[in-house]
């Protein structure tokens, strides 16, 4: 059993103080425990036990509530939809347990768990939008690691349930346990978000930070409920002293060049006036390029027999009819993928096209999975 020193002993020995706790106390407590280096398995078990002890005061704590269309408000609404899906599953599963070979019940359960799987976007938004901000803003952010591990448990278990329903490989005992774990963990995370995490966020973060997160959450895609509006803004790229603020990061010109030239693809950019403005220089080029093509009309970069295809692609991109075109060819035993992508600004205005070419022979031959580092 996990030994957590003075923190755990304090909980056991001072139950009279249970009613005095506030959300911040748990954030600080679990941050300290994670810092002590305990295994995540033990941390999750302890988290469930501790928060069970303190369930009533956590439930009854009254902090600020998020506005419906705010970032946290939309997360709360998606939590409510997730619980509705769980409530749809409950009666079907209850009947299924008594009639596990019923194909109609199996199909219905699979559809419902597939609907539930969409909720994983909620966790993705938390991990990629919310958690990075909290890590910068809170000194005691390590409790988020426990929550993330629960997210992964939920994702994995829902995937397992759908796979077992699909292939008919259902051992009722283990299947019931997996379904039970999904119900318990999803409802527990919902409770912890709405009664611990979100109240403390509203107490510590500014409205501007939350507004930015709403935009980023919209970009990733909310699972069920989306904000009623999306605040669109032009991406302002600020360049000073050789450093560019790209909105999603700050990079030097050298770093930008290194990134483009280390991607395992050929990239060529043609602007909205059909002039070649850039090409990358990876270690292995697919097609030859020289600096002489910079400023050249793209139609002059192709032989007469194929230039009409390029012109058709660019024309369809400009009028908004298409956003992507792709071809694949075989050259000297290599399989080459050639893709064209339309570039558009935040208002949808056409800003050119990029050609991306990649040698994908090894990618095409991949099978199964590789989950471990194999150097």
Image (spheres, helix red, strand yellow):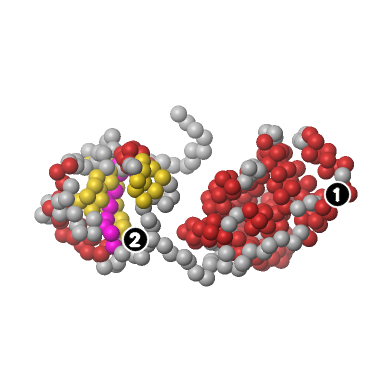
Q: Which residue is drawn at 48% across and 66% down?
A: 230
The residue closer to the viewer here, 107 or 147, is 147
266 horizontally vs 235: left or right = left
Tell me, for residue 345, which label it has, or none: 2
Query: What percent of the width, then of the height, locates residue 205?
Result: 60, 54
104 up-or-down from 134: above or below: below
Going by the picture, which residue comes out furthest to the bottom? 228
Asked whether the viewer can see residue 24, the reply is: yes
Q: Tally the numbered discs.
A: 2
Return the residue at label 1.
17
Part of the protein shown in magenta? 350-362
**Crowd around label 1: few <14 · some 14–19 · many ≥20 (10 Å):** few
Magenta highlight on residue 357: yes
Q: Is residue 24 magenta?
A: no
The quadrant holding residue 321 is: bottom left
Q: Is residue 329 visible in this depiction of the protein?
A: no
């Amino acid at each position: 059993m996990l030994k957590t020193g003075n923190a755990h002993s304090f909980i056991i020995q001072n139950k009279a103080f249970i009613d005095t706790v506030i959300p911040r106390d748990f954030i600080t407590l679990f941050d300290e425990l994670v810092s002590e280096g305990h295994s995540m398995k033990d941390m999750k078990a302890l988290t469930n036990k501790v928060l069970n002890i303190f369930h009533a005061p956590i439930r009854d704590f009254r902090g600020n509530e998020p506005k419906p269309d705010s970032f946290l408000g939309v997360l709360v609404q998606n939590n409510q939809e997730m619980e509705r899906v769980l409530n749809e599953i409950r009666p079907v599963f209850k009947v299924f347990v008594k009639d596990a070979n019923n194909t109609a019940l199996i199909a219905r359960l699979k559809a419902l768990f597939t609907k539930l799987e969409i909720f994983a976007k909620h966790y993705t938004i938390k991990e990629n939008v919310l958690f990075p901000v909290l890590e910068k803003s809170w000194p005691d952010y390590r409790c988020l690691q426990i929550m993330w591990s629960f997210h992964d448990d939920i994702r994995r278990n829902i995937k397992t349930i759908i796979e077992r329903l699909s292939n008919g490989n259902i051992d009722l005992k283990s299947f019931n346990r997996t379904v039970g774990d999904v119900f318990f963990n999803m409802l527990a995370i919902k409770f912890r978000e709405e009664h611990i995490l979100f109240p403390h966020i509203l107490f510590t973060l500014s409205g501007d930070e939350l507004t930015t997160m709403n935009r980023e959450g919209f970009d990733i895609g909310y699972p069920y409920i989306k904000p009623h509006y999306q605040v669109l803004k032009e991406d302002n790229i600020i360049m000073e002293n050789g450093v560019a603020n790209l909105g999603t990061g700050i990079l030097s010109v050298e770093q930008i060049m290194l990134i483009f030239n280390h991607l395992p693809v050929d990239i060529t950019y043609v602007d909205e006036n059909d002039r070649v403005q850039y090409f990358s220089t990876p270690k292995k080029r697919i097609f030859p390029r020289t600096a002489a093509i910079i400023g050249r009309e793209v139609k002059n970069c192709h032989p007469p027999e194929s230039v009409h295809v390029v012109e058709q692609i660019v024309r369809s991109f400009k009028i908004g009819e298409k956003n992507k075109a792709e071809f694949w060819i075989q050259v000297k035993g290599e399989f080459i993928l050639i893709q064209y992508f339309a570039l558009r600004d935040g208002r949808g205005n056409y800003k050119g096209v990029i050609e991306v070419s990649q040698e994908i022979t090894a990618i095409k031959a991949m099978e199964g999975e590789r989950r471990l580092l194999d150097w």
